[in-house]
Image (cartoon, helix red, strand yellow):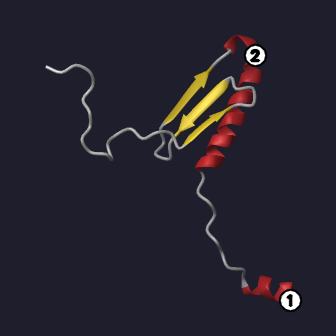
Amino acid sequence: MTSGPPKPSDPDVAAPGPDVDVYSPDRSVRIAATSRGDIAVEVDGLHRHTDDSLARQVRAAARVALASLQLPAPHVKPSEYEQRSES
């Protein structure tokens, strides 16, 4: 009998590393996320925060994480009106 969790044989089933690994400005909150929707949140130094200050740190880290996961906007050609107004 083997010990430990089973190892997946399909590479698509294996847990991927995080696409985003960010910290809050004071590094008390860490968010690791993947584009597949997996999220891990770690909090360090909780004793030095009030509810409001911790919420600010979580919001700041979440904004950076979300911005990092967003796909770049597709290149769009200027409309005919925009091309004429540039001339």
Please tell me which residue lies in front, 33 or 54: 33
What secondary structure is found at the residue carrying circle 2? loop
Q: Amino acid at mark 1?
A: Ser
Q: Marks 2 and 1, how far apart in space?
A: 56 Å
Closer to the camera in the image, 30 or 66: 30
- Determine which of the numbered discs, if any, sits on residue 87 in the image: 1
Number of residues whose C-alpha sits closer than 10 Å to that of mark 2, classed few (under 14), some (14–19) or many (20 or more): few
Q: Quadrant of residue 21?
A: top right
Identify the amino acid type marked 2: Thr
Q: Which mark is residue 50?
A: 2
- Measured as percent of width and height from the top left, residue 51 is found at 73, 19
Q: Are marks 2 and 1 in contact (CB under 8 Å)?
A: no
Residue at 68% x, 23% y: name it.
28
Disc 1: CA contacts within 10 A as few (<14), some (14-19) or many (>=20): few
Where residue 72 sits in the image (x, y, percent)? 62, 60
Q: Is residue 34 left or right of residue 57?
A: left
Question: What is the quadrant of the C terminus in the image?
Answer: bottom right
Residue at image coords 85%, 85%: 85
Q: Residue furthest front?
A: 2
Which circle's residue, 2 or 1, is located before the other in the chain? 2
Left/right placement of residue 17 relative to residue 58 reads left
Check residue 18 in the rendering and tell me which mark sits there, or answer none. none
- Judged by depth in the image, the label closer to the viewer, 2 or 1, is 1
Q: Position of residue 6 (x, y in %)?
A: 24, 29
Could you say which quadrant of the image residue 20 lies in?
Answer: top right
Does residue 23 appear to the left or right of 25 in the view shown?
left
Q: Secondary structure at mark 1?
A: loop
Quadrant of image for the N terminus: top left
**Above or below — where is 36 with respect to 44?**
below
x, y percentage for residue 56?
A: 75, 29
